[in-house]
Amino acid sequence: VQLQASGGGLVQPGGSLRLSCAASGFILDYYIIGWFRQAPGGEREWVSYITGNDGSTVYADYVKGRFTISRDNAKATVYLRMNSLKPEDTAVYYCAATSYLGGVGYYKYSGDYDYWGQGTLVTVSS
């Protein structure tokens, strides 16, 4: 099982980026995929997740309305579209996967996931 995150870079405040998380070694349809981020000197925090069966999405309050998570199971890829970026969005972004079917409130913590990608750096600065 491997996850490969990509798409990070330097963007000005108010700009947009699309991150990709390419999966290999497993059938993406059966997995919940989450995005997390870790700012310099900060702790890893949850950003969003998308379920495998019906594609339901959930967002953290601090990205709701600006970020959109989506998946293309045929391409075995999950995307995170980030609009209206702010300097405080600067972080290394990680994607993670789990096949565990948790209840309400699950998938919002690092320990809820079994597999992790290597991270991609997003820097929002003028």
Image (cartoon, rainbow, N blue to C red):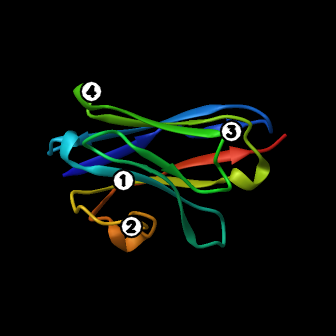
Q: Give the mark, 4 or 2, whose residue is nearer the N terminus.
A: 4
- Position of residue 53 measured from the top left corner of the image (x, y, whole percent): 25, 42
Q: Which residue is mark 2?
A: 106
- Position of residue 46 measured from the top left corner of the image (x, y, whole percent): 52, 62
Q: Give the mark, 4 or 3, whose residue is nearer the N terminus.
A: 3
Which mark is on residue 41?
none
Which residue corresponds to the image point at 39% horizontal and 43% vertical from the top-left?
A: 56
Residue 96's place in the image compared with 66, above or below, is: below
> Which picture quadrant has residue 11?
top right
Question: What's the CA distance linking mark 4 and mark 3?
Answer: 26 Å
- Position of residue 94 measured from the top left corner of the image (x, y, whole percent): 46, 54
Residue 38's place in the image compared with 43, above or below, is: above
Nearer-the-camera pick, 39 or 64: 64
Q: Are marks 3 and 1 in contact (CB under 8 Å)?
A: no
- Position of residue 61 measured from the top left corner of the image (x, y, whole percent): 65, 56
Q: Amino acid at mark 3?
A: Leu
Question: Is label 1 in a helix, a strand or a loop?
Answer: loop
Q: Amino acid at mark 1?
A: Gly
Nearer-the-camera pick, 54 or 110: 54
Q: Which residue is mark 1?
A: 117
Residue 92's place in the image compared with 55, above or below, is: below
Q: Are marks 4 and 1 in contact (CB under 8 Å)?
A: no
Question: Is label 4 in a helix, a strand or a loop?
Answer: helix
Which mark is on residue 10?
3
Q: Which residue is mark 4?
A: 75
Q: Are marks 4 and 2 in contact (CB under 8 Å)?
A: no
Q: Give the mark, 4 or 1, whose residue is nearer the N terminus.
A: 4
